[in-house]
Image: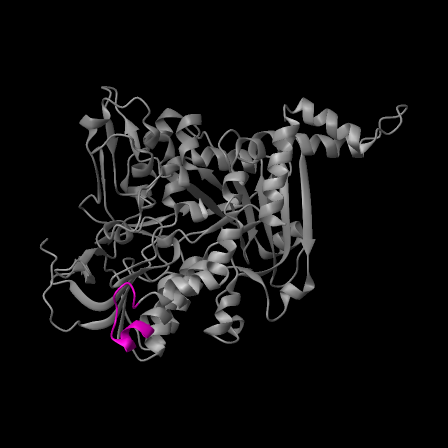
Amino acid sequence: MSPTAVTDTAPEVDVVVVGGGPAGACAALVAARAGLSVVLLERGPFPGSKNMYGGVVYPRILDELIPNWWLEAPVQRWVTRRSTMLLTDTQALTVDFRSEAWGKPPYNGATAYRPDFDHWLAGHAEAAGAQLVTSTTATGLLRDAAGKVVGVRTDRPDGDLTARVVIACDGVNSFLAKEAGLYEHTDASHFTLGVKETLALPKEVIDERFGVRGRDGVDIEIIGATGKVNGGGFLYTNLDTIAVGVVLKLTKLGAQQQRPEQIIATLKQHPAIAPLVQDGELKEYSAHLIPEAGLKMMPKMTTAGMLVAGDAAALCLAAGIWLEGVNFAMASGMYAGEAAVEAVRAGDTSAAGLAGYQRRLSDTFVLKDHRKLRRAPELVLSDRVQHLYPTMVANVAERMFRVDNPNPKPGVRRILAQERKKAGVRRRDLLRDGWTGFRSFG
Amino acid sequence: MSTVNPAEHVAAHPADILAPNAWGGLSFQDRMATAEFRIHHEAHIVVDGSVCEGCSTRECIVACPANLFVPTSDGGLVFNHEQCFECGACYLVCNKEGAISWNYPEGGHGVVFRRT
């Protein structure tokens, strides 16, 4: 056995949660509330310090853990306006929805800075009795002679910590899940790279440019914004900053020899985007990986003595019109916490004893959404959706709205057929993609 | 452990020498200076440049959002860990076994994203 083998003395704590992000905070919160002894490890100086995302969180699941969370959560703005924008070099077609309901309790989505939000959420875990240990990196797993996970090794002196259950919420690179053998393989094509610029603008300027007031905010998702590198763009309003960025298929960056910040720069120069971001002063440039492939890349979630949650379990929904991750992290963390409580109380933290986790994931939106949308990530990032359809759709719109007198108006069907051919889209492929889309989103 | 302002700490970024002010008037060095890094003297990522010499794709150079992989005139690669976002893009796109040994920095170090 390796030097990390541990003999059968009593564990120091019931549960050690690795990673103070939304998954880890919820896991620790649930386990600590149930009276278990919990250590929450965070490698950064505070929870959220390593975490970055596009900018929108959907905290509905927190109703179960923190009633009236909206009274205290550190949000920037409530998203009352959602736009999906399709760009070509010279055109833009936007579907824009707004709802007054989303600006009032119980709310829907919010923009928030992750260092604020995650720090707040981990504070609830601490208040419930979990012991937060920051600036501590978990460097590996401890196992007993039978191979069961019985704790983690950290980079502190004498930093071994034994536990009845380890909940790995150690993020998209999850070296703990890999060490436990829960990922069969790692495929670079399953990841996207998110890069973001946070740009400072006065609140009044943001309100005016984006047509919102007070704490109301805007979420714009953009397709066709990333040139030859498959991906998507986003533009979100915070209180006195805006977040503009792109999500890029990792394996396409090298192939196209395009650097991430160049792609953001091109997006910012687009005629539909430039007036929105103009004069914004760069406050922070940041980057993070996203597990993009959904069900296709997910690891085994459970092994003897250990559960995996959040990005570490690839629980991120990248399905074009739905881009969610923090809610999946919070929910999976919560269910992992519940399953750990069950197992510790029953005195069985084997894989079978921890089976309540997989059951909860399967019975709830966490895996139901992923099963339903299992084909969506690939469709959204496919070459046709990325490079052919935006041109086709924008040209159809342009011809429908162009007054071409003295020519009479052409029928929509004819425009569609002509633009499909001009864009080089085969009818067969269009039908197939339409069917895949319908099965996913319908 | 120390908090270093990279703008004062780092000489001109290689990306700026290659393409000065290429992106909206903001140098790459200024871009990186907006993020906070608590630099540890020990590199958490080590690149074995000799392995890279035989690599024809070198996707790390393009994919690294912090632009930390810089080709040298003799066909090698130099890497500086100090302004690393700890994202993982480099080891994922790397197709040379053993070229990049990737770890997280020691607890409390590395990138610290901003609170309001």
Residue drawn at (63%, 65%) of the image: A103
Tell me which corner region of the image, top left, top right, bottom left or bottom right, holds residue A165: bottom left
Based on the displayed image, in which of its 4 quarters is residue A30 positioned?
bottom left
Q: How is the image coloured?
A: one colour
On-image quarter of the N terminus of chain A: bottom left
What is the x, y in percent for residue A19? 31, 60
Q: Quadrant of residue A269?
A: top right
Q: Tell me: B62 left or right of A272.
A: left
Furthest-front residue in view? A352
Q: Position of residue A432 (x, y in %)?
A: 61, 35
Residue A439 visible in rendering:
yes
Is any atom of residue A118 visible in this view? no
Residue A301 vs residue A412: left or right? left
Is residue A346 on the magenta stretch? Answer: yes
Residue at the spot 47% in from the left edge and 64% down from the top edge:
A363
| Residue A79: percent from left, percent from top | 60, 59
Judge by depth and name the residue closer to the eye, A117 or B21. Answer: A117
Q: Residue at x 31, y 36 (%)?
A: B68
* Residue farthest toward the bottom in the current orientation of the protein: A35
Q: Look at 63% across and 23% down and name the residue there.
A: A424
**The magenta stretch spans which residues?**
A341-353
Given residues A431 and A88, the one toward you in this image is A431
Q: Residue A365 at what x, y percent from top left?
A: 50, 60
Tell whether position A349 is magenta. yes
Q: Is residue A434 left or right of residue A20?
A: right
**Residue toward you, A40 or A244:** A40
Question: In the rendered view, would you say A213 is above or below A342?
Answer: above
In the rendered view, tell whether residue A275 sits above or below residue A383. below
